[in-house]
């Protein structure tokens, strides 16, 4: 949810910059806002919006599958623990003893496996957020193109 809020703030930044760069018409009803500048502003808004939409979809998909893979660890926390089996949680054992020989195994236990999945999910979320940041950068560059009708 925090990452989606940051993407929304990117759109707000672009909107404020675009709104401040639109000139007001003169008293003689001469318009200084050209079609070239208007289309540059439209492209800047579409660039930021489309990249935010793509980043939001990517964050949603990665977050959903990441939570499923980690096994809903946060929902296992309880103030009143019980001895009942929890249905639907990860069943990877946490011990280091091999089931066949009783020795120490080289496989990754459940806790380490879930930590690795969480780190991988977090890296994918950060790179998904970068999509929106690239859109913000391109929108800022495109929004600086302008042509005044009163110059020529």
Image (spheres, rainbow, N blue to C red):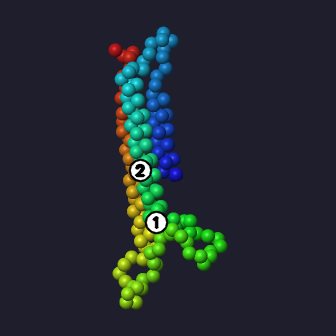
Q: Which is nearer the N-term, disc 1 or disc 2?
A: 2
In-image side of 72 versus 101 (left or right): right
In the rendered view, would you say 125 is above or below 103? above
Image location (x, y in percent) of residue 67: 47, 61
Image location (x, y in percent) of residue 109: 42, 77
Q: Residues within 10 Å of mark 2 (few under 14, many from 20)?
A: some
Q: Is residue 144 visible?
A: no
Residue occupying image coordinates x 43% and y 38% = 49
Q: Which residue is mark 1?
A: 70
Which quadrant, please, contains the C terminus?
top left
Residue occupying image coordinates x 46% and y 56% = 63
Residue occupying image coordinates x 46% and y 78% = 94
Depth check: 47 or 106 in front?
106
Question: Label 1's element?
Answer: helix
Q: Residues within 10 Å of mark 1 (few under 14, many from 20)?
A: many
Q: Which residue is mark 2?
A: 58
Image location (x, y in percent) of residue 57: 43, 48
| Distance between mark 1 and mark 2 Cα atoms | 18 Å
In the rendered view, would you say 87 is above or below 42? below
């Amino acid at each position: 949810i925090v990452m989606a809020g940051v993407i929304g703030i990117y759109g707000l930044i672009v909107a404020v910059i675009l709104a401040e760069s639109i000139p007001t018409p003169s008293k003689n009803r001469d318009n200084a806002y050209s079609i070239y500048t208007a289309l540059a502003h439209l492209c800047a808004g579409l660039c930021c919006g489309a990249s935010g939409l793509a980043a939001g979809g990517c964050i949603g998909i990665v977050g959903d599958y990441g939570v499923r893979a980690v096994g809903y660890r946060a929902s296992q926390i309880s103030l009143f623990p019980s001895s009942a089996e929890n249905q639907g949680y990860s069943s990877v054992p946490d011990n280091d003893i091999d089931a066949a020989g009783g020795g120490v195994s080289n496989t990754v236990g459940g806790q380490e496996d879930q930590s690795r999945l969480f780190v991988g999910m977090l890296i994918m979320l950060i790179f998904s957020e970068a999509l929106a940041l690239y859109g913000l950068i391109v929108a800022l560059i495109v929004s600086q193109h302008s042509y005044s009708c009163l110059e020529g």
